[in-house]
Image: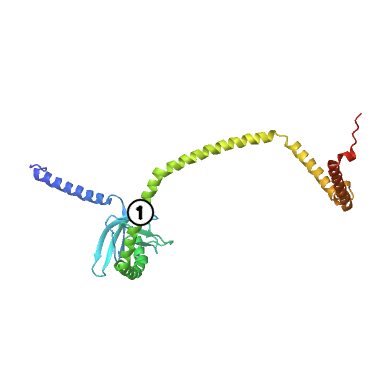
Amino acid sequence: MKKFFTKEVLIAVTVIISLCVLYFGIEYLKGINLFRPANFYYAKFEKVNGLAVAAPITINGFQVGQVREINYDYKSNDISVLLSLNKDLRIPKGSNVKLSVDMLGTAQLVMDLADSQEYYNVGDEIPSGTVAGLMDALGDNIMPAVNNLLPKIDSILTNINNILANPALNNSVGRLDGITADLKASSLELSRLMNHQVPSIMTNVDGITTNLNSTSANIKILSDELKDMPLQQTVANANATMENLKQLSENLNNKNSTLGMLMNDKALYKHLDDAVASLDTLLTDIQRNPKRYVTIKVF
């Protein structure tokens, strides 16, 4: 009896096992678990941008299956997608599956379950649709605005070119150069002032500050001396003096008082004036004729 496990048989078995391992390994790397029980449904799309085999199928963000195959139907020009869903998942009638593409272009299928007590049978076609992605929304909303903005941008560029070609702009640039030169000269002058004159000014300020400090000390000494002086008594004496002066002034202005009568009685003034004149005449006569009034007897 010949041996069954010959070299050729062993090679054939090894090749078959290797092919099986390679197949299951490739499917596993795609994310497809061939050993997990699943139900298969179909969905048709007009376009499947970014959708690939093993793309996830989610419900409320939770993965419940994956894309198993993607085939093009040459009769209806639709794209048929084979859905591999978990065995325990039952799909109510009225549900749909939508293609969703994220910002990076990666696509997935999002299933929206309906509230119904009737369910699709395994192998049925599930209605499909497309979820507007971010790029689609940007294209629908922004592109019209961009198209409207392009003529304005062209007009703005034309106006900018006209402004740049205007000789007045060159003149303005020349004037700016002159202004810049003046500012540079002013900056140098200010630097020279800060380096030479400001120190002397600060020295003078320090001297003034010293004098102010000395003056402040003298004022403080004067304030202390004034604080020690009997100001209240002095003020009281001054008030008494002012009161006396007031009474004297009232007496002088009162015609019935003695001083008032002396100052306001013209007859008295006349009599005093006559008396002074007579006294003056008498004194003059005494000087001229002393013997008439003075008798000198010699014993």
| Quadrant housing the C terminus | top right
Q: Quadrant of residue 119?
A: bottom left
Circle 1 sits on which residue? 64
Q: Is residue 278 left or right of residue 241?
A: right
Residue farthest toward the top in the current orientation of the protein: 299
Count of numbered marks: 1
Within-10-Å neighbours for mark 1: few <14, some 14–19, many 20+? some
Residue nearest the observer in this picture, 90 or 136: 136
Vertical arrangement, residue 255 with respect to residue 77, above or below: above
Q: Is residue 166 left or right of residue 211?
A: left
Q: Where is residue 81 in the image (x, y as percent from the top left)?
A: 28, 61
Q: Position of residue 11 (x, y in %)?
A: 11, 45
Residue farthest toward the left in the current orientation of the protein: 2
Residue farthest toward the front in the current orientation of the protein: 299
Q: Can residue 67 be seen in this view?
A: yes
Q: Is residue 129 visible?
A: no
Identify which amino acid the numbered label 1 is placed on.
Answer: Val
Residue nearest the observer in this picture, 36 or 22: 22
Circle 1 SS class: strand
Residue nearest the observer in this picture, 111 or 268: 268
Vertical arrangement, residue 239 with respect to residue 228, above or below: below
Vertical arrangement, residue 126 with respect to residue 257, above or below: below
Q: Which residue is drawn at 34% across and 61% down?
A: 175
